[in-house]
Amino acid sequence: MVALRIVELLGDGIGDELREATHVVAAALPIEIEFLPIDLSLENREKRGRMLYDQAIAAMRDTRLAIKYPTITHNESPNAVLRRGLAFSVIHRPVFSIPGVESPIDASVNLQIVRVATGGTYEDPGRMIGDDAAVSLRIVERRPVTHAARFAFRLAQKTGLTVTSTSKHTIQRITDGLFEAVAQTVAQEFPDTRHQVELFDALLAKIVLCPGNFQVVLCLNEYGDFLSDMACGLVGSMGLGASASYSFTPESKPDIAMFDPAGGTAPDIAGQNKCNPSASLLALAMLLDHTERDDLATALRDSILRGISSGECTADLGGSLSTSDFSAAVAEDVASRVRA
Ligand code: ATP
């Protein structure tokens, strides 16, 4: 019996190799997964236009689960089109240290960044006022902040962690003030979960100095963007992680979820069987967490990390394995873990 139906959004560059790696590893898991592919490659997007996105959106509304591989951004960003079409309002981006990956700091990082995916300054490119000034609108809305806050507190509650909400509420008193007010209100729904508030600039310094003091971080769109990249720099890798985008029911329950690897299409190495599929496999692990198969998610993450820390990995991390050899090794390792 098929236990999971997952829409698979095919991309460009190394996308096919990442897909193959994902299938090899998924086949080693004791769960029946049906992948429903939709070709979002640039060529097909240019050929089919809006109809293709409509098909992808309808399929994702049906399965409520998707994995997306990297796509080239040409005229439009597929992620932005999907975000608007499916009302994705929260991005969850875990960033953690990986033994064996060189990092600029000694301390270990394990951050769950929960970011409002809409609004902030990112919806409005701005406009000129005369020749010498420009202005843009910054939007903060109660609804997506409530979804993000409930997601963050639920995650913290499940794992016994602390939520840090962060903004510049002392300066952006109305916009960031609304964000912090919503965070406070939601915090009251979770009386057993610790909540602290940090100004965003101070938080960056504190994370660099003492990352272990922070766990779930809740923030608005642009702060989350900056923090995610800084955290990736701290763990020594921009491209190793994965993220999840969520839409929500009116009760703030996650509704449609899409998981995608960080990192781009790497056209320079596409088709050479040498890309690192870890980020796509970590995206699959996040999907398993979301579907309440935490046991499989943990086993899969452990297998990926074991490969990397033991040096049995791809060349970008100093190893000598091809994409297919690395994924076969992860598949074998995870199969033995879930059998045990
Ligand atoms: P895009 O326009 O899609 O962002 P890009 O090549 O400009 O593509 P990335 O895809 O992020 O940007 O690639 C940056 C560098 O990192 C390239 O040299 C690429 O080969 C390398 N790289 C990216 N992803 C991987 C991967 N999964 N495994 C190994 N190397 C990778």
Image: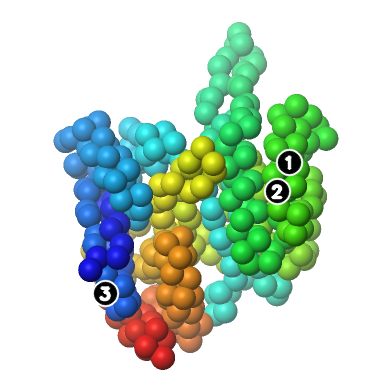
In front of the other: label 2 or label 1? 2
In front of the other: label 3 or label 1? 1
The answer to whether residue 221 is seen in the rendering is no
Secondary structure of the residue carrying tag 1 is helix
Query: Residue furthest toward the left?
Result: 47
- Classify residue 325 by image quadrant: bottom left
Query: Residue furthest toward the right?
Result: 170
Q: Give whichever of 44, 128 is nearer the camera.
A: 44
Name the mark on residue 185.
1
Q: Amino acid at mark 1?
A: Thr
Query: Residue furthest toward the top?
Result: 130
Q: Earlier in the sequence, mark 3 or mark 1?
A: 3
Secondary structure of the residue carrying tag 3 is helix
The alpha-carbon separation of the residues under discs 3 and 2 comes to: 40 Å
The answer to whether residue 61 is seen in the rendering is yes
Query: In the image, is residue 108 above or below residue 333?
Result: above
Name the mark on residue 189.
2
Query: In the image, is residue 230 above or below residue 322?
Result: above
Residue 320: % across, % down:
37, 82
Q: Earlier in the sequence, mark 3 or mark 2?
A: 3
Dots 2 and 1: beta carbons under 8 Å? yes
